[in-house]
Structure formats: C-alpha cells, structure tokens
Image: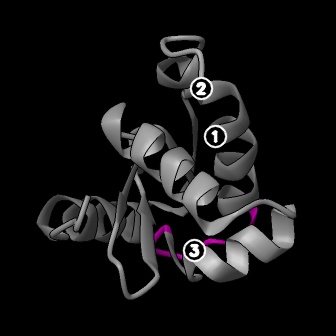
Amino acid sequence: MNDVNVKNLTVLAERRRNLRPAVVLFNFLAEKTDALNCIHLSKGALAERFHVSARTVANWLYALADVGAIKYKYSGIIRLNPIIYYVGTRKNYKKALSEYETFRSDI
C-alpha cells in the first residue's frame, strides 16, 4: 500500500492555554492542504473565514509555529508539519517532509 496517514496531534494538546482555538485553525488548514501539505491563505482571508481579527489569526499561527505544527510565510504560504499531519502517498510524504524541512518560515 502506498498511502501514508499521519495524525499525531499530541503536540497540539493543551501545552498552552491559547492553543485550543489554534487547533481549530490547524484542523481547517489540514482539510485544505495540497499533496505536499501546503496551503496558500493570507491572515486576512483566515480572519474573514473565522470572523476574528488578523491579529488573532497571527496569534494562532504563532502558537502553531511555536509547537512545530506549521511554518508560515507572510506571503500567505503555510506548510503543515508532515510528522504531525499528513494524508497522501508515500512518495509525496517524502517530498512533503523535504519541503517542510527546507521551508524558511517568517515566524
């Protein structure tokens, strides 16, 4: 079987009080990622989607980045850590790992 299904969300468990709303954001992002665990959405678009301020979204993104769940660029590129969450083929999993490791986050 060539499929990989990783959902190790223990890193998102109540390590920080403000992480709980960030987990909702993480779950939303997980549903929208491409085959390499990447999504293109601005803070403004996410704020609109969740009916919160861009600053609140920024805080959630910082919290997720702080626990190693994501990497984020201000241009709106978000990469989810494949060790924490990935659904796809084994070939793309290896590519997603490589892309995540070399991706330079702004936060």
| Residue type (three-letter) at the residue carrying disc 3 | Lys
- Marks 1,3: beta carbons within 8 A: no
| Residue type (three-letter) at the residue carrying disc 2 | Asn
Element type where label 1 sits in the image: helix
**Residue beneath the point at 41% across and 50% down:** 82
Give how far across and how far down residue 36 sits, in percent: 45, 73
Residue 34 among those drawn in magenta: yes
- Marks 2,1: beta carbons within 8 A: yes
First in residue order: circle 3 vs circle 2: 2
**Residue identified by numbered label 1:** 22
Observer-nearest of 77 and 34: 77
**Residue identified by numbered label 2:** 18
Give how far across and how far down residue 65 sits, in percent: 36, 45
Image position of 66 (left or right of 90): left
- Local packing at callout 3 (Cα closer than 10 Å; few below 14, some 14-19, many 20+) is some
Which residues lie in the magenta part?
31-37
Image vertical order of residue 79 relative to residue 1, above or below: below
Q: Quadrant of residue 8?
A: top right
Q: CA distance from mark 2 to mark 1?
A: 7 Å
| Residue 57 visible, this orientation | yes
Image position of 53 (left or right of 100): right
Image position of 99 (left or right of 79): left
Which mark is drawn over residue 43?
3
Image vertical order of residue 3 relative to residue 36, above or below: above
Give how far across and how far down residue 76 sits, in percent: 46, 82
